[in-house]
Amino acid sequence: MVKTMKWLIPALLVLMLQPAPAQDKIVEEYPEVFLRAAREQKSVIFVFCHANCGWCRLFDKYHASPDVKEILEKEYLISRIDISESESGKKLFEYYALPGVPAWMIYNSNRELIFNGKYPNGSLVGYPIEPVGMEIYLDAIRMTSSYINEDQLRMLGEKLVYIEGR
């Protein structure tokens, strides 16, 4: 017993003195979004935007479209962060070193980043209108969704191209 105590106490002290893992900045700034996501068992799509950005307004229209909303709201909360109106949003935008807007990221309800909204080379997808960007967006939805089927994904892709007001 004494031999066990000799190594157990130092081991426990080492474990207790370890710093807690750093929490993601977006989790710190938007805890209410993650509480709701956990309660509703949904993932969160954060969209960084700016009031003067045409592509951002288009992404807003896309997410507000009844067809898109009906599909996405079953599994996702869409949280819009306007960097022109929110100082904390602007700081987050700078923290993540995002090169432009719109920028989007997907987190699960456990507060873990699932997809960062970037191409494999690190550049920003933005509004996913280009074929490769659209495929990345749809793959992100495909990988993070339990219920969205291929027909619905096809419709989401078509809406990206043919959203009203474009």
Image (tube, rainbow, N blue to C red):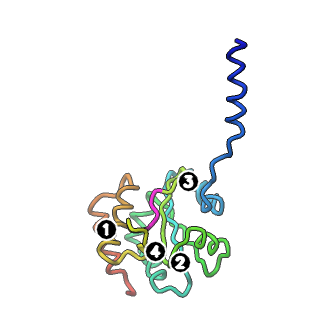
Residue 106 image offset from top left, x and y in percent: 47, 61
Q: Residues within 10 Å of mark 4 (few under 14, many from 20)?
A: few
Label pair 2/3, CB-CB below 8 angstroms: no
Q: State if disc 3 and disc 4 touch (CB < 8 Å).
A: no
Depth check, mark 2 against mark 4: the one in front is 2
For mark 3, what is the residue?
A: 111
Q: Which residue is mark 2?
A: 49
Q: Of the residues under marks 2 and 3, which one precedes in the sequence?
A: 2
- Real-space CA distance between mark 2 and mark 3, rounded to the nearest whole angstrom: 21 Å
* C-alpha span from label 1 to label 4: 21 Å
Callout 2–callout 1 Cβ contact below 8 Å:
no
Q: Secondary structure at mark 3?
A: loop
Point out the tag, 4 or 3, that comes first from the N-terminus. Answer: 4
Mark linked to residue 135 = 1
Residue shown at 66% from the left, 71% from the top: 88
Whether residue 160 sits left or right of residue 5 in the image: it is left
Q: Please state the horizontal and vertical placement of residue 79, each as a whole percent of the image.
A: 54, 67
Q: Position of residue 51 (x, y in %)?
A: 56, 84
Q: Which residue is mark 4?
A: 64
Looking at the image, residue 110 sits to the left or right of residue 87; the answer is: left
Q: Amino acid at mark 3?
A: Arg
- Amino acid beneath label 1: Glu
Structural distance between the alpha carbons of marks 1 and 3: 24 Å
- Residue 163 point in image, percent of width and height: 36, 80
* Secondary structure beneath label 1: helix
Residue 154 shows which numbered tag? none
- Count of marks, rendered view: 4
Q: Secondary structure at mark 4?
A: helix
Q: Amino acid at mark 2?
A: Cys
Q: Which residue is found at the position 63% from the left and 62% from the top?
A: 30
Magenta span of residues = 114-118
Residues at marks 2 and 1, CA–CA distance in whole angstroms: 21 Å
